[in-house]
Amino acid sequence: MEKVFAIETERLSIGYSLKRGRQKVVHENLNLQLVQGEVTCLLGLNGAGKSTLLRTLCGFQPPLAGEIRLMGKALASYSQMNFSLTVGVVLTEKTNAGGITVYELVSLGRHPYTGFFGQLKKRDHIIIEQALEAVGISHKSSNYVSELSDGEHQKVMIAKALAQECPIILLDEPTAFLDVTSRIETMVLLHRLAMEQQKAILLSTHDLDLAIQMGDCLWLQEKGRPMACGAPEDLIMSGAFESFFGKEGITFDPTTGKLNTKKPTVPVGVEGDYLVSYWVGNALIRNGFCPAPVKAGQINIRCVRVGELVVTLKDRTEKKCSSIVELVNLLKFC
């Protein structure tokens, strides 16, 4: 199926205009493509310019140079009304709307359709109810916004964007300040909406693990260098993640997709049950060992099942361990 580009940029420069005609350039020569039906995650360290890029793409601040196209049309050609029908924006900051109900807040997403007086018609109510149902928050529709948890509040803001019936949704740190369960729920929700409703969704995040798991495409951003864009797996295997996020004392492990504080150096062979092998590998890395294919001349671990780990030492003697703690203690003294 041919990809449809909801947002395209060509030689885009982002940053700020200063006094006396000077400019502070954050990034330049950006050629980006946001695809309909996909979740794209924007990743970068603090100060990389993620918020500047999002604000520029949604017209909150002008580009310094280059072109931005939304659904094939130049961003500059959009009226405020047409832009509202095309792009929904969800910011990190909580809205000061504690005194209205969930339903009333989501209904504000229908403003581009309701005219000057904002009178909701039958179709508007149907769209609002569908948006509430899509994010799983319809049971809270009569609650006041002030009564919601952070995760519920984020779902309501996404529902408001859905009520706009726009093909593009931009979110600035949607999982910030959420607990781990709410972060996962939010990312699963966004991925489902992208697939089922063919939305083009772009979100900035610091959550490396979730971005790798749930992002169809990643944009890696760092000041002073070109952005790297592509599928998470391609970026991992190409070394882009290590290049962008590996710092002194911190390395990116392509076998686990995680950042480590020290680079494992001692190889230990791991094979057997997939789940047990994964968590054995996790413990090995934390303790300075490097999970590797099984081979002669090194320590090897056979993960039979939970509670049954068979360790073959270099002298070919075997030891059985019933827990990962016991395994790690054994390895430390080998």
Image (cartoon, helix red, strand yellow):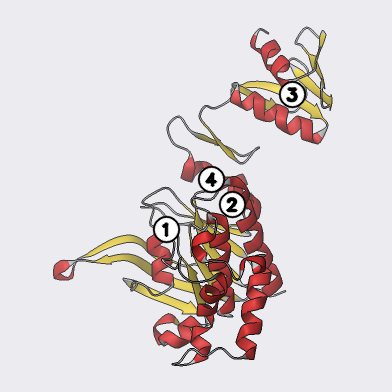
Residue at 59%, 80% in the rendered image: 165
Residue 50, numbered circle: 1
Give the label, 1 or 4, closer to the camera. Answer: 1
**What separation in Å lies between label 1 and label 3 (alpha carbons)?**
40 Å
Give the label, 2 or 4, closer to the camera. Answer: 2
Q: Position of residue 289 (x, y in %)?
A: 63, 22
Residue type marked 4: Phe
Place residue 103 in its image quadrant: bottom right
Give the label, 1 or 2, closer to the camera. Answer: 2
Give the label, 1 or 3, closer to the camera. Answer: 1
Residue 250, numbered circle: none
Closer to us: 277 or 2: 277
Residue at 60%, 63% in the rendered image: 39
Q: Position of residue 206 (x, y in %)?
A: 49, 49
In primary-sequence order, the first of circles 3 and 2 is 2
Instruction: Identify the residue position indicated by label 2 in the image.
Output: 183
Q: Is 12 situated left or right of 263 in this image?
A: left
Name the quarter where the C terminus is drawn: top right
In primary-sequence order, the first of circles 1 and 4 is 1
Residue type marked 3: Gly
In primary-sequence order, the first of circles 1 and 2 is 1
Residue at far right of view: 304
